[in-house]
Image: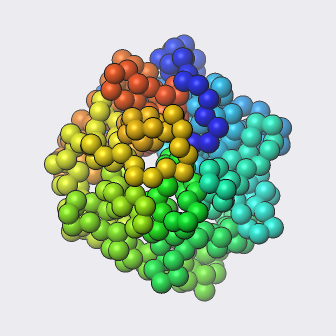
Amino acid sequence: MCQAVSNGDMRSGEFASIHVRAQLSTAFPVTSPTTAAAKRELDPLFAKLQGRVAGLIANARCAHPLGVTAYTPAAFGAEYPALYLRDFTYMAESAPEFIPPEHVRAILALFAARVSPEGLCPERIGNDGEVFYVCHGGRPVTDAPLFFAKLARAYLRHGGDTAWLAEIFPVLERTFATVPVEASTGLVWIDPAHPHTAYGFTDTIAITGRHFFCSLLRFEAAGILAELADRLGQREPAERYTAEAARIRASLEHLWSPEHGLYLAGSADCRQADVWGSAYAGVIGALDPARHRLVAATLRAGRERFLLRGQVRHLLLPEFWQRRVVVAEWTEPGTFQNGPYWGTASGWMAEMLELAAPGAGLALLRELAADFEAHGIWECIGPDGYARVANNLSSACLPYAAWKKLSAAS
């Protein structure tokens, strides 16, 4: 992501256990466990991951000059010193039991108030109050309006005020309309002549043409707007966004690669099998049942080409990205988004592996949690001791959400 600084040297395992227990039991009490939750929490690795998630969120929280309680992407705030919309959305979606709903509402209101006159949604707001619409490549970040919709849904699912959401619904619509789209398909389109940040977890990579991952986010956002419009009694936009989500879903076929049994990241630059995106497509219901099972089986069969210590590479080995927006030492093959392995996608992968082979997904999550115990929680890792940005929230929160989901279904 933008504005990364040097590798962190503080691991999440250094949190005092008494502090984590206090977070779990008092500040943000967990709902009384269901039978599935009780079974899950008997797993010592899950309990440790839950404690780590609580501690990371507590230590990512900070005061913000614009009057909200902000959350940084990495705990303790030294790395990525800003309130990033996508990272906070992942926290709010994954671990709402540790984030007060009033914090989510305040952050939604802050971003709504900073949507530009042209409808652009900020991707982040610095800890000094500076608002950013652009990351790399000189054009506005593509995923911000889509994560804005996802955060609105997270707030709603956390018991949020529907009447208040009605007030920001026009802003959600206005910024959704700014996403660059191929008119004939509804897929997100990134101009090959002007590559720029699209999805923030590949923000240095020049994926151009039809952009698979951002199209999945647009599919999600259209469905969210349809759901909100329906709750608000607005029939016309509800029908329109429902139809748009269906159109995007059908158009994803343009990026299907029979050769790989997976989807391609882009249709112009980086026409490469997208491991993250293919897993995510299954998780969010963008695939029909037969394709869902096929992608899950493909990922299960090829797992040695993208898994390391429970963490997930963007691409299949031995590939690296074909084009970059940022050409620098820290984006060379084997670094950052160009070859290392991330916990961010481990939960999505676990859900797909569980479909392909019951028990395999939960086994992946246990492997990941054990690695966190042994080596700490990092933004990404690689062979030969490579690790970047300690105490990263998405690495822990998204797998935690998947573990809850898979345990409830078992």
Give percent across and percent down for residue 150.
56, 58
Compare residues 121 and 33 and report the one nearer the observer.
121
Give percent across and percent down for residue 56.
55, 28
Depicted 156 relative to depicted 317: above or below: below
Question: Residue pushed farthest bottom?
Answer: 236
What is the image's colouring?
A: rainbow
**Rendered residue at 31%/46% (across/down):** 319
Depicted 361 relative to depicted 5: above or below: below
Compare residues 336 and 300 and report the one nearer the observer.
336
Left or right: residue 22 versus residue 126 is left
**Rendered residue at 42%/42% (across/down):** 338
Left or right: residue 157 versus residue 395 is right
Viewer can see residue 255 = yes
Viewer can see residue 349 = no
For the N terminus, give its image quadrant. Answer: top right
Left or right: residue 28 versus residue 362 is right
**Rendered residue at 54%/17% (across/down):** 9
Compare residues 385 and 215 and report the one nearer the observer.
385
Q: Number of callouts in the render?
A: 0
**Rendered residue at 40%/67% (across/down):** 267
Give percent across and percent down for residue 152.
62, 58
Please identify the quarter of the rendering in which residue 260 is found: bottom left
Give percent across and percent down for residue 55.
55, 25
